[in-house]
Amino acid sequence: MSSWTRRLAGAATFVAAAVALTTGPAAAEDPITLRVAHSYPTRHTGAIAMEYWGKLVDEQSNGRLKFEIYPAEQLAKSSDLLDAAINGISDISYAAPLYVSDRLPLSTVSAIPLVGNKSDPREQGAAYSELALGTLNEVEYVPQGVRVIQASVTHAYQLMTTKTKILTPDQLKGVKLRSSGGIQERSVEALGAIAVAIPAPDLYPALQRGTVDGSLFNIPTAGGYKLEEQLRYSTSNLNFGLFPTLYVINENVWQKLPKDLQDLLIRTGKEMDDYIQKLYVERAETFAADLKKRGGEVYAIPASGVPVWAGKLKPVQAAWVKDYDGRGLPATRVFHEWEELMTSR
């Protein structure tokens, strides 16, 4: 039971006593403490960002609202974090839709490749946040008893190779590319390449041995695996999907919060995302510099050539919509809204 729920149980008694004993100015408001659960190790960027969010919440609420943070699966295993928020074990939980796609299928829309034409990570993140806090809350989260209060995406996954600078899809015929499975695997195959499922920690030796010729990977994360030591080239403006991460709050807890604290949670959640994006930009710049030192480069596909890539990947987009529409979900609606949000006019 959360500290919020425990306080409510004695709220009437507390109020009655306060009225009887207080004859001067109103007593100070008792702070609200929300239990936050996530799976990140304490030194992970995600854990550091959560500590930053907690600090923002405390400061901007003048101590009225506080986070009690439980990192590293202390309250629930990664696969159980969504249920922890639903069942009140936590007040707020981390959720990664691609890891629980059976529970949050529509939230995986960000993983669809080459949707829209926005390539700025900040614009992409803002687009997903708007979708998650709006339509996805309506159709996927609130019906399960939780609500998204913060949503982020990684930088877009790019095409990275060890030897050849790829400019057109026809250069990928027979090329072996690591994918994480699922929609990434379908994307690799749609481009004529050979998909090889390899966990991220095993990618470095696979590149070293020539098991694969490259990978779909996002640039800020690649440096953490030292992939610049084996890779030479990476695109910068293709979008092979965005990995989404969210924080959800128990709906009953949300409804009991004062409106100004609800607004504060949303606002500071976006500030946390700005903080994460700055870290991503720094890491992307470091990765690009390291590639350049080794004779490689991060390069952009010419604008005139991007539609060729998009055309190859249209069937992957259509398959996602058809699959989830076929399950009775509003996939067409979600996809079209996502496409609109990801397109600059």
Image: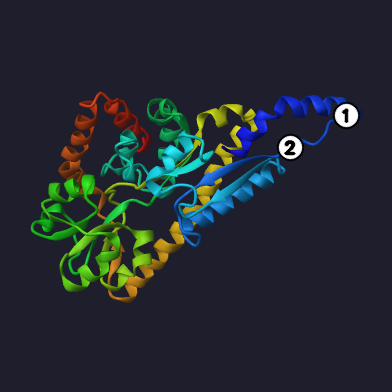
Which comes before the other along the chain, label 2 or label 1?
Answer: 1
Residue type indicated by callout 2: Asp
Residue 231: name its quadrant.
bottom left
Query: How many other residues sit within 10 Å of disc 1, few (<14), some (14-19) or many (≥20)?
Result: few
Residue reaching furthest to the left: 174
- Residue 317 sits in quarter: top left
As drawn, is 293 to the left or to the right of 138? left
Quadrant (top left, top right, bottom left, bottom right) of the C terminus: top left
330 or 235, which is in the foreground? 330
In front: 74, or 298?
A: 74
Q: Circle 2 is placed at which residue position?
A: 30
Residue type at mark 1? Leu
Residue 177, percent from left and from top: 18, 59
Of badges 2 and 1, the one in the foreground is 1
What residue appears at the point 60 percent right and 46 percent down from the top-left corner? 67
Rendered residue at 75%/26% (across/down): 13
